[in-house]
């Protein structure tokens, strides 16, 4: 049974989305990881302070995570721990981070809904752009004389595809996230 390390915690800082020098998306957030309660000599359990570290993701997953998660949200992530050295004021410092390949809500403490629409039927950024272009929003100005003389095969294909797609109303995960109070553990 192949397995990967996983962590459970909460987003402790406002997540950021940056891009690498190669143009890949990079998600970063400081996170608090839940630790098991400790038992004292009398057999009583006591909560343990969370362990704080950095969580990063790359690529399309990073973009989805940035659009979905905000400070205070609970999550479960799968990936790998990574340590590295960094020069801080002339001194080599060892740091660690969790590089997540997947992230999702922690169903034990978070209420969420699942979109069971087949992936090929879901609205994608490319389909949204196509629909926007066909409706004329954000479209560049076109010289009518040039447009009549030179047919654009790409525009024809995009228009045909746009007519075949019925956009679904886009529900914003951020809207429901704003209604929740952040929970620190």
Image (spheres, grey):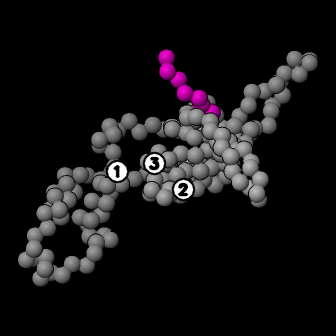
Seen at 23% across and 64% down, the residue is 134
The spot of residue 96 in percent (x, y) is 68, 42
Judged from this view, the residue extending furthest toward the left is 149
Check the image and report above or below for 25 versus 185. below
| Label whose residue precedes the other's in the sequence (2 or 3) | 2
Question: Looking at the image, which is closer to me, 142 or 59?
Answer: 59
Q: How crowded is mark 2: few (under 14 residues within 10 Å), some or many (20 or more)?
A: some
Q: Along the horizontal axis of the image, is 166 left or right of 117?
A: left
Measure the C-alpha gap from mark 1 to mark 3. Answer: 15 Å
**Residue indicated by mark 1:** 124
* Quadrant that contains the C terminus: top right
The spot of residue 175 in percent (x, y) is 53, 54
Seen at 73% across and 31% down, the residue is 35
Q: Are marks 1 and 3 in contact (CB under 8 Å)?
A: no
Question: Looking at the image, which is closer to me, 177 or 55?
Answer: 55
Q: Look at the image and give the residue range highlighted in magenta.
A: 1-7
Measure the C-alpha gap from mark 1 to mark 2. Answer: 19 Å
6 is within the stretch colored magenta: yes
Q: Is mark 1 on a helix, strand or loop?
A: loop
Q: Which mark, by number, is residue 17?
A: 2
**Residue indicated by mark 3:** 59
Measure the C-alpha gap from mark 2 to mark 3. Answer: 10 Å
139 is within the stretch colored magenta: no
User: Mostly what secondary structure, the magenta segment?
Assistant: loop
Seen at 57% across and 40% down, the residue is 99
The spot of residue 46 in percent (x, y) is 84, 28
Q: Along the horizontal axis of the image, is 185 left or right of 23?
A: right
């Amino acid at each position: 049974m192949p397995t990967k390390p996983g962590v459970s915690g909460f987003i402790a800082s406002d997540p950021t989305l940056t891009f690498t020098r190669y143009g890949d998306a990079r998600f970063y957030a400081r996170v608090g990881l839940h630790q098991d309660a400790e038992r004292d000599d009398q057999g009583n359990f006591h909560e343990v302070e969370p362990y704080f570290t950095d969580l990063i993701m790359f690529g399309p997953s990073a973009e989805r995570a940035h659009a979905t998660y905000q400070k205070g949200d609970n999550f479960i992530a799968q990936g790998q721990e990574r340590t590295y050295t960094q020069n801080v004021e002339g001194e080599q410092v060892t740091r660690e981070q969790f590089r997540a390949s997947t992230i999702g809500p922690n169903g034990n403490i978070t209420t969420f809904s699942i979109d069971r629409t087949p992936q090929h039927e879901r609205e994608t950024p490319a389909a949204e752009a196509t629909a926007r272009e066909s409706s004329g929003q954000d479209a560049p100005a076109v010289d009518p004389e040039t447009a009549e003389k030179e047919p654009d095969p790409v525009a024809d294909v995009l228009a045909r595809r746009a007519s075949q797609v019925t956009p679904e109303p886009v529900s914003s995960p951020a809207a429901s996230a704003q209604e929740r109070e952040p929970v620190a553990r």
